[in-house]
Amino acid sequence: CAGSGANRGGLNPMSNVTFRQPFSLKLVSNGFLAFWCFLATFPIIWITVMSFKTPLDAFDSNPFVVILGPNTRDNVGGLSLIDIVLAIALAWFLIRKAITWLPRQIEAFSPSGNATLAWTIGVIGYVIATIVLFVVVLPFVLGILNPLLGPLGNNIIGITTEHYEAVWIDRNFSRNFTNSMIVTAGVVTVSLTVGTLAGYGLARSDSLIAFWLLVLALVFRALPHSVLVTGYLPYFISSSEWLQPIFGDAAPTLYGKPWAVIAVLVAINQPFTIWMLRSFFQNIPQELDEAARIDGCSHFQAFRRVIVPVMWPGVITTGLFSFLLAYNDFLVTSLLLDANNMTMVPAIANMFNRETTASDEVQAIAAAVSITAPLFVLVMVFQRQIVSGLTAGAVKG
């Protein structure tokens, strides 16, 4: 009766009960998570360490020699304790600012309707500022501090950037980086433009035709990439012939050019983009469309000015997946691009296949480490939008 009276009075006897995870389960779950994080990050961390050592240290069987790099320290140079502390502090500061300060500044100063341009300019400017701080400002400051600090200014870890200089300058890896940016920018732009329009139309349509279009898109997405490349290849090779009536003698051959890769990767990625964006649009009430129409907007104006800003995290999340597909692709890029237009992933594979000396192998490792930096920066800058977009796509409200 007392319990019934409490319930009648609006009190829930379970409301004050706190459910806590048992210590044993917490220990097991946290231990498994830590072990998984170690397995996932160890290869990246280890090859990063190797890429800053001379071959004698990089391939030593003793892990402490690889980490400390005594041969590198004695013959080339290294880092002192104060170098390490200031570099870590600067990196932590820049990461925190990229997560918290940069998105707020971009949103505050971005003009209405030009959020994409504002984010592009903001991210590029922040990356340039980061490079200047690490490459110019920090070495200048440390060059003044180290001689004044006595033992704290002595090198304790050997490090060299000669492999990165050889890859990016001598081997012209910057050209491969530029080709990767052209391909990824083209794929993301076309995929999001077509995907947002198609996803919005399919989300607002209840017809049977829309359903079968989605099913056909899913079937097309399941096809092996090699089938699509084989189907497109004859047309790319003979493109100058069937484009000649339009461009005359200046008709281009698409085979070996980035535009061919963009076309194939968009064809591969577009079904996934449409499906994902459609799920985001379905989470937006149709009342927003109706309210915008009442205020005098056309269908397209309601889509551009009202709907897209609401589901902007979903656009960023989908754009990230499109970026990863184009950025990490090996099969399509290696089959359709010539040596002058090769992107970074197949170029690194060619480095590992052709290298014969230990120095060449370390340079190939340095190139492999280089391609992870843009991904790290991208995830750090857009992490809030990515988490928000994944949550919005998983929960239908």
Image (cartoon, helix red, strand yellow):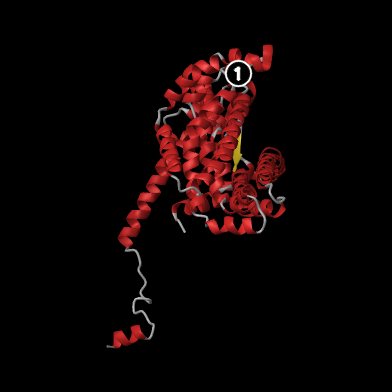
In the drawing, does residue 167 fall left or right of residue 278? Answer: right
Circle 1 packing at 10 Å, graded few (<14), some (14-19), many (20+), is: few
User: Which quadrant of the figure has residue 306?
Assistant: bottom right
In this picture, is 145 found above or below 355? below
Report which residue position mark 1 lands on: 340
In the drawing, does residue 20 fall left or right of residue 245? Answer: left
Disc 1 is placed on an element classified as helix
Decide which of 213, 268 is in the foreground and name it.
213
Decide which of 390, 215 is in the foreground and name it.
215
Decide if residue 331 is in sight here.
Answer: yes
The N terminus: image quadrant:
bottom left
Q: Residue furthest left?
A: 1
Image location (x, y in percent) of residue 123 = 65, 43
Image location (x, y in percent) of residue 350 = 50, 20
In this picture, is 370 found above or below 377? above
Image location (x, y in percent) of residue 109 = 72, 52
Image location (x, y in percent) of residue 59 = 46, 27
